[in-house]
Image: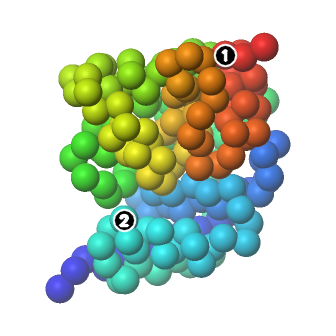
């Protein structure tokens, strides 16, 4: 029998629109999505990611530390996200890709090629892109900081406009 997960979901405003955030009972961030009306799709995504339909989401308050960290980030404290604990299911490669993303400092970008090299898989550029596209904890696990080798803004599940806004907010784009 598969494990059962009972998590909280809360909705908060951001400069990019309403965000949905899923946390576990320990206060660890499990998912972040931009759409206030996507509670059903975030639940379906988590069920696929964890390989079980035994996930329930209950409306509940976001842990204060996570809320304050996000508010501080929006207000310009670009280091505020680094203290937010995250956890997610994923393949070992996805886990490695997502962990690597958290090493990119705010205000900087890396290419998919640099990420692949940094993960010791220099030929896995497309696999890195696929793993990043499956990142369930955008912004906090900053896949928006990865760009094309030629400097183009490519591949962001939240949309290129949001990626551009985030990079401008962090000072990585003028």
Q: Nearer the viewer, residue 58 or 97?
A: 97
Asked whether, in this view, residue 116 is left or right of residue 73, the answer is left
SS assignment at label 2: helix
As drawn, 3 above or below 166: below
SS assignment at label 1: loop
As drawn, 22 above or below 82: below
- Across and down, in percent, residue 123 comes to 26, 27
Q: Can residue 65 be seen from the camera position used here?
A: no
Q: Which mark is residue 7?
A: none
- Across and down, in percent, residue 8 comes to 54, 69
User: Residue shown at 30%/55% (left/top)?
Assistant: 90
State if disc 2 and disc 1 touch (CB < 8 Å). Answer: no
- Across and down, in percent, residue 37 comes to 73, 72
- Between discs 1 and 2, the one toward the N terminus: 2
Question: How is this picture coloured?
Answer: rainbow
User: Residue shown at 43%/27% (left/top)?
Assistant: 112
Q: CA distance from mark 1 to mark 2?
A: 31 Å
Q: Nearer the viewer, residue 135 or 20?
A: 135
**Residue where numbered disc 1 is placed:** 172
Q: Can residue 94 be seen from the camera position used here?
A: yes
**Residue where numbered disc 2 is placed:** 49
- Across and down, in percent, residue 59 comes to 62, 75
């Amino acid at each position: 029998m598969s494990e059962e997960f009972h998590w909280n979901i809360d909705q908060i405003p951001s400069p990019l629109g309403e965000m949905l955030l899923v946390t576990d009972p320990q206060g660890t961030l499990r998912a972040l999505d931009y759409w206030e009306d996507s509670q059903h799709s975030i639940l379906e995504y988590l069920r696929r990611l964890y390989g079980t339909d035994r996930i329930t989401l209950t409306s509940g308050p976001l842990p204060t530390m996570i809320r304050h960290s996000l508010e501080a980030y929006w207000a310009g404290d670009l280091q505020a996200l680094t203290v937010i604990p995250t956890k997610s299911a994923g393949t070992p490669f996805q886990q490695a890709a997502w962990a690597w993303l958290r090493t990119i400092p705010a205000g900087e970008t890396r290419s998919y090629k640099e990420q692949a090299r940094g993960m010791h898989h220099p030929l896995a550029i497309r696999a890195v892109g696929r793993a990043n596209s499956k990142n369930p904890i955008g912004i906090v696990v900053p896949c928006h900081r990865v760009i094309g080798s030629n400097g183009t803004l490519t591949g962001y599940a939240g949309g290129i406009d949001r990626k551009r806004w985030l990079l401008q907010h962090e000072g990585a784009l003028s």
